[in-house]
Image (cartoon, grey):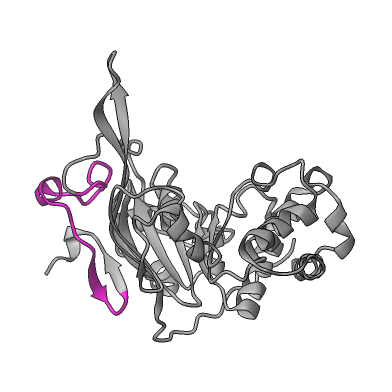
Amino acid sequence: MAAIEEKQVIQTDQESIVKIEDLKKYFPIKGGILKRTVGHVKAVDGVTFDIRKGETLGIVGESGSGKSTLGRMILRLLEPTDGEILFQDHDITHLRNKHMRPFRKDMQIIFQDPFASLNTKMSVEQLIEEPLLVQTKLSKKERKEKVKELLEKVGLRASDRLKYPHEFSGGQRQRISIARALAINPKLVIADEAVSALDVSIQAQVLNLMSDLQDEFGLTYLFISHDLSVVKHISDRVGVMYLGRLAEIAPKKNIYEDPLHPYTQALLSSIPDTDVDRERDSVHLDGDLPSPSNPPSGCAFRTRCPMAHERCAEERPELQEVKDGHYVACHLYDE
């Protein structure tokens, strides 16, 4: 099995490439003969954070927590219901497609399923060349050379450009997706469960590749995953989402060595440990994730939290800095 090279985290005063403020996405629920709106699914319900230039921010949480919806809103693949998105200090929250186009080349996404995200009727060369046709003025010869260069950067052969997606393994297809995302030299890459569909050994190879490319091209990553072990190895900071809200965000070391929010503690206690002799505090969560169409009042986590009290049902906790760079939304830490 290939080893994942754990990223060395260097703390710097980095400028933010993305800032989001109180971002929300509500999907309407239609009902009745007239299909009127009878409610909303609150997929993202007031999220605030920034992504710093050159870092990898990991976003983790259970399925249904709003991670993927958040990533797609930042790229403006989904229209926000409310809130603000700043990309390199430009407000892109409600820009129309023609005004978003100059920003598209700086923002790319790597999807979970590379086979579904790649057009099977196009060759690898056509897939990687497509963004170059749309966003650059390179000549045909320059585009062909760029495709060969990118394939070699991601560990494939230049001759692979003539093949089609079905001729590759899952790991190789994800490498093609990465090459396509890097074709126009983006500044921000959102990896949405980019390795979850791959075998563990292939996951390690792709993660190491992404780290190497980040160093080489100065990329900024938003890495979305439900796997805390994977996030630990690639991230500089980690944000934990629960039911559309941010429960905690902090440098990686703080999250994994000193988690503050009861939900983060429960997630970390669920990670399998190969050391059977090590004593670990296990946090058991009762019940299932509540419906985002009818979230609990106050703190969204209170219905499953072993430390919930009366105030948790009445007042929604705000994200507050408890330690240096360590933010948590929990009444346990209110002054």
| Furthest residue toward right | 159
Tell me the residue at 11%/70% (across/down): 335
The answer to whether residue 120 is left or right of residue 97 is right
| In this view, 268 is above or below 320 | above
Identify which residue, 52 or 198, lies in the foreground: 52
Helix, strand or loop for the magenta stretch, by majority: loop
| In this view, 243 is above or below 201 | above
Tell me the residue at 39%/86% (across/down): 13
Percent x, y of residue 60 = 44, 56
Identify which residue, 236 or 72, lies in the foreground: 72
| In this view, 27 is above or below 160 | above
Identify which residue, 229 or 157, lies in the foreground: 157
Please check the rendered image and state whether residue 228 is part of the magenta-colored stretch, yes or no.
no
Is residue 201 among the parts visible in the rendering? Answer: no
Identify which residue, 285 or 241, lies in the foreground: 241
Q: How many marks?
A: 0
The answer to whether residue 61 is left or right of residue 114 is left
Tell me the residue at 31%/72% (across/down): 326
Q: Which residues are drawn in magenta?
A: 299-325
The answer to whether residue 218 is left or right of residue 26 is right
Percent x, y of residue 161 = 83, 57
Percent x, y of residue 323 = 27, 76
| In this view, 227 is above or below 64 | below
Image quadrant where one finds the N terminus: bottom right
Is residue 129 among the parts visible in the rendering? Answer: yes
Percent x, y of residue 285 = 34, 44
